[in-house]
Amino acid sequence: MKKVPNLKRYIYIDILFLFILILIKAYIYFFEADFQHMNIRNIDAIKTKTENKQSISFEVLGNVNNSITIFENRIIKKINSDFPDFVILNGNSVIDGAEDKYRMLYKSLKKINSSVIVGIGEKEIKDNGLSRYYKHFGDTNFSFKLSNSYFIFLDTTNESEESWQKQWIISELENSQYSKYKFIFMNRPPYKLQDKSILASNDKFILSEEFRTFLTQAFSKYNVTAVFASNIEGLDERKINGVSYFTSGGAGGIITDENNFYHYIKVNVSPKGVSYNVIKQENISNLGVHNIAESIWLYIHSLFYINFINILIFLSIVILISMIIYTKVFVGKDYYKKYDEITQTQDINKALKIAMFTNNFLPFIGGVPISIDRLSKGLRYLGHDVYVFAPEYPDYTDSENYVIRNKLLIPYKTLGFQFPVINIFSSDIEKIFNEHDFDIVHVHHPFWMGKKGLKLARKNNIPVILTYHTRLEQYAHYIPVFSILFKNVISHHMIKNFSQKCDVIIAPTMSAKEYLRNIGVSRHIEILSTGVDFENYPEPENSSVKNIEKVYRGERKILLCSVSRLAKEKNLYFLLDGIEYIKKNLDISFKCIIIGDGPEKENIIEAINDRHLRDVVELIGSKKQNEIYSFYTASDIFIFASQSETQGMVILEAMAGRCPVVSVRSSGIEDIIQNGFNGFKTRADVKEWANKIIYLMKDDELRHKISENSFDFAKQNSVKGMSKKASDIYHKAIINKRKL
């Protein structure tokens, strides 16, 4: 398959860029200075400013459309040089009602030296903008009085009920009768007019003929001085029944009609009367077609200016989708093995330098440390150099020099259980790693030290092997916050995401492999269980075995055994419920010993007392591994209830000690126990599980037969055999890495 160079890197860069843009948008929306009820505050300021003035001046602008080049860069400068008492924006001041358009308008308005009143128009309510207008400016219908002038703002966007508006406007006109001058402001004009611009539609006026007639008659009846509207590209002046009407929309946006021009209206009110002056803005060129082209360009410039971040986000998304589609559709993939390639050869007996990375190790007793210890010893027996990067433990010194202990960031302790957090930020780890010419990196956790090992391997182009040891979702109760989210989402995502970065995944059982496939892991997966160290198992007649029988079995017929860390995920309360059921329903004498220690010890002791099991259940604490082998050999039945295992290593260990197993079904057990052959596996039902134990306790002949079958089955999983398979996996991974 032909590789696309750096395409994945570009995708990540694009995602990062997109993330930054979204953060900027979020910052602007949530943290940039907000403004509320601006009209109310500005009206109060205008009243204060004009309180003792006989003459006032104001300027009316329509269709600003978030214009930068025309409104902000030209018209505002002219307004500031006019020194009006206040400014009125008569609708369509924004391109649409999105929050960023309102904020951009606010930035422009702050450059005006006079107070500004913003009326509502069609574009203010687009994209659910009505609520934003109300938040930033206030009511859509409002009025105020200055000296001998009365100002009424009418909402013509159809957002207000027409019948209510009729009552409201009459009420306001009644209130204005004692004012000499009355000014009305609205977005749509109350008369028909034709907008001849290229982009115009013919519905720029109030559509209801009955409402138009009502308004013009009311304005005439109450001697309104002037009515200002916008919503068109140019300027329309007329008188209807003695009332002056100005429809002005030249403060921004696009000018496409050569007869139109950018402008605003300056109004002077004095005791002598009212004067109106149209203030034109000069265009760069005089030719009509050039005027049209210039205004379109200026509009596009303003549009891009205010939507700059939105456009970048849009382009980033388009580019990201395009790159993903390209990799999925246009980059050729061959899912079949290529038989015509010359196979690279490598001496499979060549000694390798292997670096293993783990979050925990001996002396901590657990499935992962024991598995690593056995594998590393088996690999060294085959002639490989193995180094284990592991945490240091206080007051513990290694007898072997192959363990590279690393300083701790923090040790986490809880009720006797210690989880050491290695300082992965220390440069010593990389320094020691670089001192060895490693051929392969084998990580045993998909986080922390696992990530450190992955990073060093990728940096040095070394194959990475991951062994999937742990069902992380079963450890969610150790997470103080978001434990449900960790259990149902994060844990599976962590495993999938990390696995996809490795060259080979080792699953201890077929069930574990199926899980990895189910969560979306597509990397090559090998099945390799932890081997059993048969050389350290004693014979039944060994003195250590006899001593265990003497101390713990005594005169009892059956000795049950379980090996487990005393933790919630090990399902030990289920086990105790089963023992309680056996005690109540069986007259055969027995003793159950539980080997292990952990954070639940005190609670388990309390549970034993509550169930009155002190005479049949005994917690005997942690034991050295070689001692545990003697307990397996001395016991009659091994019982197990945990459902958090990926392979149930203790199950194989018990079988190697000729100990039949009764366990609860789970992913780590399903592939090991064959019902009726080497043990029994049941549903997580206390009675069903306990009855299988009772069945074995009663039948001596069956128990002996399953004991021998268990031993024969376990012999197929020796440390030597496992180590040889692991060595073969390493060599294949190195060959495949060289092909890339």
Image: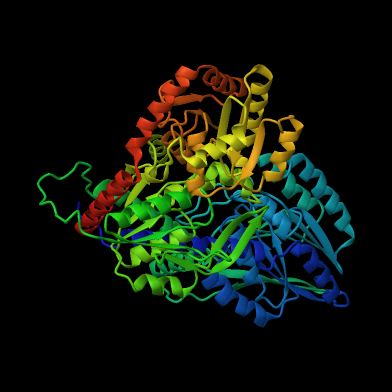
Give the x, y percent position of residue 198: 44, 55
Give the x, y percent position of residue 672: 41, 32
Left or right of 569 in this view: 159: right
Count the labels in the image.
Answer: 0
Left or right of 201 in this view: 606: right
Q: Find residue 702 and report its image quarter.
A: top left
- State the residue in front, 715 or 95: 715
- State the residue in front, 165 or 554: 554
- State the residue in front, 236 or 590: 590
Q: Give above or below for 92 relative to 604.
A: below
Going 38% across and 35% down the picture, which residue do you hit? 714
> Could you tell me if residue 257 is visible in this image?
no
Give the x, y percent position of residue 186: 69, 55
Left or right of 268 in this view: 623: left
Q: Give above or below for 16 relative to 414.
A: below
Tell me the quarter of the image containing the C terminus: bottom left
Q: Find residue 574 and report its image quarter.
A: top right
Going 53% across and 48% down the picture, which residue do you hit? 490
